[in-house]
Amino acid sequence: MQTLTSPDVVVIGAGVIGCAVAWHLAALGAGRVLVLERGQVGNGTSAMSSGILRTHYSVPQNVELAQRSWRFFERFAEHLDDAEASAGLVKCGYLIAAPAGDKVAPLREALAAQAARGIAVELLDACAAKEKLPIARFDDAALIGYEPDAGFADATLTATSFARAARRRGVVVREGVAVTGLVLEGGRVRGVRTDDGATGRIDAGMVVSAQNIWAGELAAWAGIDVPLVAERHRVLALAGPAPYTRAMPVFKDLGSPGMLYGRSYGDTQMLVSEGTAGERLATPDTVQGEVGMDLVAHIGEQVAARFPGWEEAALASSWTGVYDVTPDWNPVLGPVPGLEGLIVGFGFSGHGFKLSPAVGRVLAQAALGQPTDVPLAPYALARFAGGRLLSGRYGAGAVS
């Protein structure tokens, strides 16, 4: 087994964010990089991602990160210099609709902000929207936006591709090794402690935490406030009366009680879930939770209201995923005040996969003391104490 006893940078976590950070560190000339993962690469919360890719956000800072990430996904293999690398990208577009009410103004402003950044967006009427998504109804829509450069991909495949490309650049990835603490000396992080008896302490010049729902461990390790909760979200795969094909766009229904999102799954079924708050967990846990029939019926009623005939849809499968949620449903990125040698990326609140290529790069840049592509000040940990929240205008939830 390949090891590194004194790396220049340690990355904690090999989900899609941690693997993206590791690859970017290597690409930026970081030197010796070690990734420590308690489980397996891409097999934690990343494995449960719905995989939707869009640049639509009502938080302007997220739009730039998403735009940069989409450009990376479009030329994924080229960026990784690996002809076999794949994110499993399906470019089918993203359609978002709002009925008359309080969601119309935020939607209009968000679409205008996308267009101002040079992102292709279109305003559709009900007939044009139905041409793109013929299995749905749009007669109640007051505003419909369409983003052609959007779609979905595979988060696990993305993570493993990043990890393989990072290894080719000399990064060492150790699976089955849990970090149990930080080495603190003189107010600075000097490395990590692990549960591996052979290398219990690993010294490093810089530590990057990409721990996802386990980032709360930093509170005990470093004595910092980590405003984070783990939330379980349920996802359904439904088989309806007509196929939801890969040529049909991802759909966001701002008018439904749960602000539903849906996409093609397996080229015939619909993957669907709610974009609002989920079940809060007392402790981080990726074990599959129950998907009760009451919840299936609740989501099914919303699906049937938008997709005629789908009241007879069959439940093909279901699963749960866990979000690392901050008070404003947006991530914390960058250094921690008063604690040198540590860069954090947590609290993605359902945005992590969408933003992973760009976030991986800015966290790597921050770790190396380089200017970041996107200013990290809005994502600072201190924003919560200072009341400078990055709250989305659609309300609490993963659409932000």
Image (cartoon, helix red, strand yellow):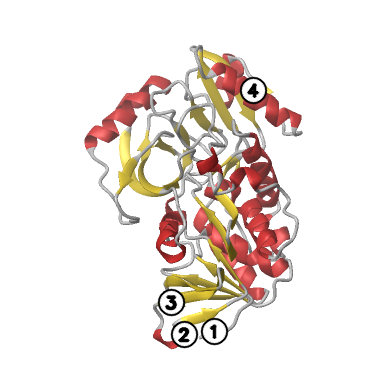
Q: Element under label 2?
A: helix
Q: Would you say the residues marked 3 and 2 are in contact, meaning their CB atoms lie under 8 Å apart? A: yes
Tag in front: 4 or 3: 3
| Residue picked out by circle 1 | 3
Nearest to N terminus: mark 4 or mark 3: 4
Residue lying farthest left?
Answer: 293
| Residue picked out by circle 3 | 194
- Relative image position of residue 284 (x, y in whole percent): 35, 55
Q: Would you say the residues marked 1 and 2 are in contact, meaning their CB atoms lie under 8 Å apart? A: yes
Q: Badge 4, how many Cα within 10 Å: few under 14, some, many 20+?
A: some
Nearest to N terminus: mark 2 or mark 4: 4
Q: Badge 3, how many Cα within 10 Å: few under 14, some, many 20+?
A: some
| Residue picked out by circle 4 | 109
Tag in front: 1 or 3: 3
The Cα atoms of the two marked residues, 4 and 3, are separated by 47 Å
Q: Amino acid at mark 4?
A: Glu
Q: Element under label 4?
A: helix
- The image quadrant of residue 285 is bottom left
The Cα atoms of the two marked residues, 2 and 4, are separated by 52 Å
Q: Would you say the residues marked 4 and 3 are in contact, meaning their CB atoms lie under 8 Å apart? A: no
Q: Amino acid at mark 1?
A: Thr
